Image (cartoon, grey):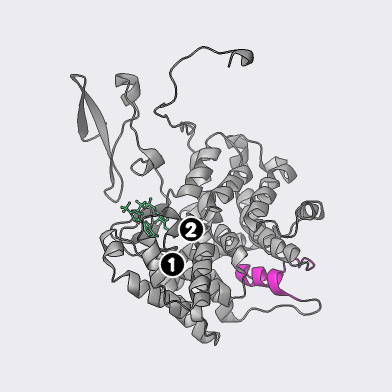
Amino acid sequence: MAAQTASLKLDGKEYALPVMVGTEGEKAIDTRKLRAESGYICFDQGYGNTGSCESTVTYLDGDNGVLRHRGYPIEQLAAHSDFVETSYLIIYGELPTAKQRKAFGQLLRKNAAIETQMQRIFEGYPDDAPPMAMLSSIVASLAAHYPELAANNFEKDLQHFDLAAAMAIAKIRTIGAMIYRYQHGLPYVHPKDIPFCENFLHMMFSEPYKDYVAEPEVARALNLLLLLHVDHEQNCSTSTVRMVGSSAANLFTSLSAGISALSGPLHGGANTAVMQMLQAIHDEGDDGTRFIEAAKSGNKNNRLMGFGHAVYRNFDPRAKIIGDACEKVLAKLGIDDPLLAIARNLEQAALKDDYFLSRKLYPNVDFYSGIIMRALGIPVNMFTVIFAIGRTPGWIANWREVASQPKGRIYRPRQIYTGPVARDYVPIEKR
Ligand code: ACO
């Protein structure tokens, strides 16, 4: 029984709607029965004010710039944890013990390789194919290569969940590195028995007879980058994973759908768009004024990329962490990137401008992440792939929640139809 109810008057009748309250005090009106009782649905284009699920994974307070995973503040995880440990936390709900952490790491290492038969898929793509298009389809093919882990049956798929989850995390990273090698006409480099981020850099950048050994600063920077992307509540790609998963689709298929959702420039593709914008400012020798003025026109095509967020109406806490890390990583690596100075100037100029202030538009995580990735030697067209590698544990945790709720229903929103009313078919010769 809900402690509180909301009342709604419609057509002279009063409806009592249960009120839900989350553990952090988030409130919602439960309208699930409203249509059956009144004939009305709730209209919320884009679901901006709709709670589509109950979740224990991530808490986000966009008004106050708060982000916590399983209760742990992102600032503490960024300072003390690493990507693999945080992935475990996200997926299983608790920080691992030393024994659990070791076993999880070993499972990732054991399942990192892409088998020869799967490697042939790459050859089917042109070498300039968009990396995210390749990634989503190759990840979808995991369901075809490992059908025993992808039964499209919650109960069966949950029995193999630990293995499927580890495979997804480790293999999506390996596939990402292989896409890069394929596009550059380089032979694939197979994973080694080394830590997660070092392994990725090894697979990306090793040369024939010369293994790439990541500097500790470089591996740490990649770790931070992946960790900061690990989950972000019900964003577009995570909701997509849940939606696809709600049909009892297996983990790999659901992840592939999430990768597709992430590829759009308003979501994961924004980091690429930020770099293109900063580069254009640099090439034009402009100080960014032209871009700021264009962004203020209200034209969606001219938005200041890396600014604004669907949920944060305050600083994105990840942007603060990554902005600081950016300075440190570049200094440690001895890199003087003119795009960092441009980004700082642009941020300062925008944050003094009433257009951005009044709309509460602040830099988001993508504003600085591209500059770090560039410093690590990662090309711009691979940025969203890195984001996908980082977000995989969050998608997995959300898929698991969907699969573990036997009474959960398939995601199936309603609509308000605004098309033609009923009319009779006209044969082609009479049209
Ligand atoms: N530049 C200029 N104006 C903007 C920007 C921007 N980046 N973002 C929002 N606005 C304006 C809108 O035009 C709108 O103005 P109006 O009130 O005069 O109509 C106002 O700010 C409110 O914006 P919304 O459309 O309500 O913002 P919404 O929540 O729909 O969009 C989004 C959020 C998509 C992130 C948007 O801010 C945007 O396009 N940003 C640039 C792309 C980007 O950086 N995306 C990354 C998001 S983070 C992530 O996916 C990891």
Mark 1 falls on what kind of element?
Answer: helix
Residue 296 placement (x, y as % from top left):
35, 61
Residue for badge 2: 89
- Count numbered badges in the picture: 2
In which quadrant of the rendered image does the C terminus lie? top right
The stretch drawn in magenta includes residue 199: yes
Q: Which residue in the rendered view is the most extreme toward the bottom?
A: 334
Residue 75, can we see it?
no
Residue for badge 1: 77
Which region of the structure is painted magenta? 186-207
Q: Dot 2: within a 10 Å radius of its alpha carbon, few (fewer than 14), some, or many (20 or more) residues?
A: many
Mark 1 vs ligand 1: CB below 8 Å: no
Quadrant in the rendering for residue 386: bottom right
In which quadrant of the rendered image does the N terminus lie? top left
The one nearer the camera, 367 or 145, is 367
Mark 2 vs ligand 1: CB below 8 Å: no
Mark before the other along the chain sequence, 2 or 1: 1
Q: Amino acid at mark 2?
A: Leu
Q: Nearer the viewer, mark 2 or mark 1?
A: 1
Q: In screen coordinates, is 279 left or right of 64? A: right
Mark 2 falls on what kind of element?
Answer: helix
Q: In the figure, 333 relative to 256: above or below?
A: below
Quadrant in the rendering for residue 373: bottom right
Disc 2 and disc 1: Cα gap in Å? 10 Å
Q: Dot 1: within a 10 Å radius of its alpha carbon, few (fewer than 14), some, or many (20 or more) residues?
A: some
The one nearer the camera, 294 or 307, is 294
Disc 2, disc 1: CB below 8 Å? yes
Q: In the figure, 175 relative to 380: above or below?
A: above
Residue 18 placement (x, y as % from top left):
26, 32
The stretch drawn in magenta includes residue 105: no
Residue 362, can we see it?
yes
Residue 66 placement (x, y as % from top left):
33, 60
